[in-house]
Image: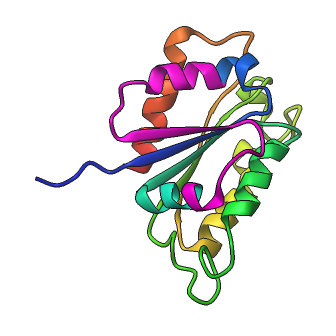
Amino acid sequence: MSRMPSILWIIGHPQFQEAVGAQAIVQNLMGHEQVEFRIICDVNWDRGEEQSRWMNADHIVFHFPLFWYGMPGILKTYLDDMLQPGWAFGEGGHALQSKTLSASITTGAALSSYASGGNNDYELSQFMLPLQQTARFTGMRWRGVTATGSVPWDVAETRWHEHIQEVFERLL
């Protein structure tokens, strides 16, 4: 019997307790045995323990609200701390090779505004280019972005389950 692929779902939000989307994702992930989730809302982490989690995962998902067209600063700080030379890249840095990386994001704006001519003028995938390049540079396979817009104002409760299923489909 083969083992189920494991997913490390990293939620980065500086105000996690008030984060409607992040809270809904956590609630909907409860009971998924192959998913370990981490909540990054401050700088209290142990790099060695976190890197061990990354090593043990087949798939890594970053979940975050889109803040000024990118990830929140706390998640960027975490990512910078994890991706060390000799571990994630450079000489001897092969820890992440062959893993997959995906983004799971929420936006306050409607997703239709992320298009040429829309309020944000660019496709949402264009704002994910730094993560896509991070995957390439570290030997991971980029699996794209899954997004839910209009959070928290206009999201049906069933959307969160659909959102998670869309991420799973990208990964597996």
Number of numbered callouts drawn? 0
Residue numbers of the magenta segment: 22-49
Residue 149 x/y as whole percent:
70, 24
Left or right of residue 37: residue 81 = right
Left or right of residue 40: residue 108 = right
How has the structure been colored for display? rainbow
Q: Is residue 18 above or below residue 45?
A: above
Seen at 55% across and 25% down, the residue is 25
| Occupied quadrant, residue 139 | bottom right
Residue 12 x/y as whole percent:
70, 39
Q: Nearer the viewer, residue 17 or 4?
A: 17
Residue 158 x/y as whole percent:
49, 13
Q: Is residue 143 visible?
A: no
Q: Nearer the viewer, residue 128 or 54?
A: 54
> Residue placed farthest to the bottom in the image?
91
Seen at 67% across and 62% down, the residue is 82
| Occupied quadrant, residue 169 | top left
Seen at 53% across and 25% down, the residue is 26
Residue 156 x/y as whole percent:
58, 9
Seen at 74% across and 33% down, the residue is 13
| Occupied quadrant, residue 66 | top right
Instruction: Say if the magenta span includes residue 9.
Output: no
Q: Is residue 135 visible?
A: yes
Q: Is residue 118 above or below residue 48?
A: above
